[in-house]
């Protein structure tokens, strides 16, 4: 059914659950898995005295390298083929745009992502990468809620 799965990761517990679900699915289906990590640069546009945006950016790049090693090892351990790709958001290309572009370039059959399930003001202020991807995607998107436990009660929802 699905032969090429892209999973968006950001280091959060929610994205780790999404990765675990994508890894299980890829293992069962014999699919190729690509994990995609985006360095988010949005906070780097603050114009405050003494603010050095390179510190945050460098830490996010380092986190991407750490995730690459960790996720690659998990894929090898489970015998799942694939890779990890790191992209960098800019003022022109935000994270949802990068995720969808990465899925298109990978020729993905499915995008898997975690969702925090924010509502109201939190969603308005913080936005939702998952929501924008679902709305703009031409691919099926499997959302893994942050409350998912991985058991029967934590079944993923497909959008």
Image (cartoon, rainbow, N blue to C red):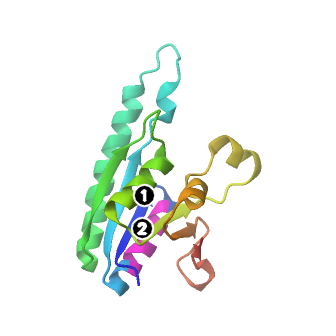
Name the residue: 32% across, 79% down: 31
Give percent across and percent down for residue 123: 68, 49
Quadrant of image for the C terminus:
bottom right
**Residue under circle 1?**
9
Quadrant of residue 100 in the image? bottom left
Can residue 10 be seen at all in this image of the molecule? no
- At label 2, counting other C-alpha atoms closer than 10 Å, the crowd grade (few under 14, some 14-19, many 20 or more) is many
Secondary structure found at label 1: strand
| Quarter occupied by residue 145 | bottom right
> At which x and y percent is residue 35?
35, 62
25 versus 38 height, above or below: below
Q: Which residue occupies 33% across, 58% down?
A: 105
Dot 2 and dot 1 residues touching (CB under 8 Å): yes
When asked about the image quadrant of residue 26, the answer is bottom left
91 sits left or right of 130 in the view: left
Instruction: Measure the C-alpha gap from mark 2 to mark 1.
Output: 7 Å
| Residue 19: assigned label | 2
The N terminus: image quadrant = bottom left
Instruction: Look at 58% across and 74% down and name the residue there.
Output: 158
Q: Main secondary structure of the magenta part?
A: helix
Give the SS element for disc 2: helix
Magenta stretch: give its range: 15-25
- Name, please, the residue furthest toward the front: 138
Tell me the crowding category of disc 1: few under 14, some 14 to 19, or many 20 or more residues within 10 angstroms, Cα based: many
* The residue positioned farthest toward the top in the image shown: 49
Tell me which numbered mark, 2 or 1, is placed earlier along the sequence.
1
Left or right: 23 in relation to 81: right
Give whichever of 10, 127 is nearer the camera. Answer: 127
Number of the label disc, if any, that sits on residue 145: none
Q: Is residue 44 above or below residue 25?
A: above
Q: Residue at x 30, y 55 (%)?
A: 85
């Amino acid at each position: 059914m699905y032969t090429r799965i892209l999973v968006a990761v950001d280091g959060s517990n929610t994205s780790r659950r999404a990765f675990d679900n994508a890894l299980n699915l890829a293992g069962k289906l014999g699919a190729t898995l690509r994990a995609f990590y985006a360095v988010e640069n949005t906070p780097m546009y603050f114009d405050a005295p003494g603010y050095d945006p390179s510190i945050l950016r460098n830490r996010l790049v380092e986190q991407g390298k750490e995730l690459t090693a960790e996720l690659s090892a998990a894929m090898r351990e489970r015998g799942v083929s694939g890779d990890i790709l790191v992209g960098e958001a800019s003022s022109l290309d935000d994270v949802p745009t990068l995720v969808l572009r990465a899925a298109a370039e990978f020729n993905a059959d499915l995008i898997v992502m975690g969702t925090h399930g924010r509502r109201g003001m939190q969603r308005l202020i913080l936005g939702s990468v998952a929501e924008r991807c679902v709305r703009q995607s031409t691919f099926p998107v499997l959302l893994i809620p942050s409350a998912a436990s991985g058991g029967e009660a934590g079944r993923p929802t497909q959008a």
